[in-house]
Amino acid sequence: MVTVTLDTNLFYDAAHDRGGCSDFWKIVDLARGSEIAVFYTATTGFEVQDDSAMRLVTRLRMEGTLREDPNAGTQRDYMPGGPGPHPLNDDEIDAYVEKVWPNATLLGLSYESKRQDVCHLVAHQRNDRDIFLTRDGELLSKRHLIKKLLGITIVSPPEFLASPRKGSAKII
């Protein structure tokens, strides 16, 4: 069975009925039908940022459709009682950011977001999942580089749903 990590942006979209949420529910239906297994990783920031997204995650976890994987990051990124981290130090995270986004600056507004993206991608890799599913345009535009660096297959929900063989991680 193919294992899929859902990027947190997909939960925000579904919880607020934004663009792409119909694809989210089609993917959830595939998981409910045991055609795929879906996972997510989250830091404390996700857990406190959006009540609606967390209620959605909680509902899907309670029904057994969604499972939480350990995230990657520094110890300060986690609350006690979670699945625990795949440890990364700040230098490792920054090195990945520099490789994927060489023009990103530490003082840039989106730098912290890029660091969080790196943590999710490294967690996906270390959790040995097949496909990382996202609507994040920056990640999708860098997917070939990320595949080369980390061996991760990144696709968008429409690409995943259009694949004739969703059971194959060889989509891209």
Image: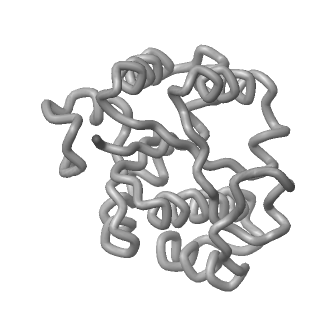
Q: Is residue 107 above or below residue 136?
A: below
Indicate left or right for 165 with 27 as reference. Answer: left
Residue 146 or residue 75, whichever sits in front = 75
Report the quarter where the N terminus lies.
Answer: top left
Residue that appears at 40% across and 43% down: 4
Residue that appears at 51% across and 60% down: 121
Q: Is residue 8 above or below residue 56?
A: below
| Number of marks in the rendered image | 0
Q: Is residue 111 above or below residue 1?
A: below
Q: Residue furthest left?
A: 164
Residue 9 or residue 65, whichever sits in front = 65
Residue 76 or residue 91, whichever sits in front = 76
Indicate left or right for 45 with 30 as reference. Answer: right
Residue that appears at 62% across and 56% down: 70
Residue that appears at 64% across and 78% down: 94
- Chosen colour scheme: one colour
- Asked where in the image residue 57 lies, by quadrant, the reply is top right
Residue 35: x and y, percent? 29, 28
Residue 105: x and y, percent? 68, 74
Q: Is residue 169 above or below residue 76?
A: above
- Asked where in the image residue 91 lies, by quadrant, the reply is bottom right
Residue 19: x and y, percent? 51, 20
Residue 83: x and y, percent? 69, 54
Indicate left or right for 159 with 27 as reference. Answer: left
- Asked where in the image residue 161 lies, by quadrant, the reply is top left
